[in-house]
Image (cartoon, grey):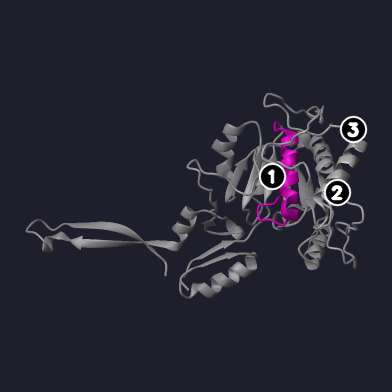
Amino acid sequence: VAAVQFTGAGPTAAAIRSELSSGLRPLLAECGGSNSIIVADDADLVHAAAAVVQGMTALNGQWCMGISRILIAKKVRAAFQKVLETAFRQRVVLAPSDAPVEDVAAYLHEANIKEFGPGNLLRSAPEDATNTSDSPLAVTQPANSSIVSGITEELSIVGPMAYKEHTERLQRIISESEGGVVQLGRVFPGVVPVSAGHPSPNASSFLSPCLIVDGNLEMLSKTELFGPAAAIFEFESIEEAVAMTNKADGQLCCYLFTNQTQRAYDEHCIQIHSGMVMINSISFGFEMPDGEEGPMGDFVGMAGSGADGNAEALARFFTSTRWFGLNTARLAASPTTSTASGANFALQ
C-alpha cells in the first residue's frame, strides 16, 4: 500500500497514521470537526437563518460540513434567534423517512397558515436593505418561492438518526454541555421523538432539532455534534468571533455572513483555522472559476490532513515529483554544466 485515503473519526485516522508511519506512507484523512457559522451584526439575518437551517438539517445534520456552532453578534442575538426559530417552524418537520413528501408538505402548509397566515413566509431582504435589532422581522414579506438562493426546497424533512447509539451520544453531549435547550421545528403526527439533552430508555432514534444555548464553549468547540443540533454563542466583535471559532481542534468549514464581504475576504478568511471558509453561502461544495468542483481542504488540525473533492487535489496527494540531473560535460567539449527537470509519477 503506497498511500491511504480515509473518511471517518479522528482517533481511527490517528491509528491508521501510526500503522503507515513505519513506511513513511502518506495519509489523506477527512475527519470532520466542530464547524461554525459566524453571523455579523450587519448580515442579512433571514439569509443567515436559512443557511443554519440547511446546515443543521441536511442529511439529518449528519454531514461533514454541517454546523455545530453558531456565533452571533451580541447586538443582533435576540433578533437572530427569533428569526431562526421562525425559520425552523416554517420549514422543518421531524418525520419518518418513508412518510410521503406530499403528506408532510401538506401538514407543514396547514400549520404555517394557522400560525403565520397565508403566504407569510420569511424571505431574505433586498441587497440594499439592512436588518436591525429593533425590528427583527422587518424583512418578513409574503413569499411563494424559496427563502434564500441556493436552497430550493421550502420543506426540510428531518428523519431518524443513523442508529440508536448515535442518538444517545448526541443526547449525552447536550446534557453535559451546561447550556439550555430550545426545541426547533415541528413534529409530524405519530412521531415520538426523544427529548434533546435527556437520555432515556426510549428506543426512538428521532431527535428533535434543537439549539444549545450558551453552553460550555471549550467543550463544544472540540465536539462535532453530527446531528440536528447546534450550540449558539454571542460575540462583541468579528475578531472575537474568529478567536472563538479557532478554539476548535479542527473544522472542515467555517461560514461567515456579513455585508462587508471584501473585508471578510481580505482579512478574516486567512485568520480562520479551517480548510474552507465560505462567505454568505452554505453548500455541499463550490465551483472553481474554470467550472471544476472545488477541493475540500487542506484540512486543519484534527479535521484531517491533505485535501480531497476534486481531481487536482487528489492528483497533488497521489503523485510525487522526482528530479533528474544530467552532466552535459560528458556529451560535449564545453565547461561542465548540468541541467535538471522534474516529472510527476503516480504513487504505486
Identified by mark 3, the residue type is Gly
Q: Compared to 102, does 237 lie above or below? A: above
Q: Which mark is residue 3?
A: none
Q: Residue at x 78, y 31 (%)?
A: 143
Mark toward the viewer: 3 or 2: 2
On the image, numbered disc 3 is attached to which residue?
117
* Separation of residues labelled 3 and 1 (CA atoms): 31 Å
Q: Quadrant of residue 87?
A: top right
SS state under label 1: strand
**Residue type indicated by callout 1:** Ile
Which residue appears farthest toward the top when viewing the image? Answer: 128
Disc 3 or disc 1, which is closer to the eye? 3
Q: Is residue 28 depicted above or below 151 in this figure?
A: below
Report which residue position mark 2 lands on.
103
Q: Viewed as shown, does residue 158 lie left or right of 312? A: right
On the image, the x and y values in percent for residue 277 come to 60, 45
Disc 2 or 1, which lies upstream in sequence?
Answer: 1
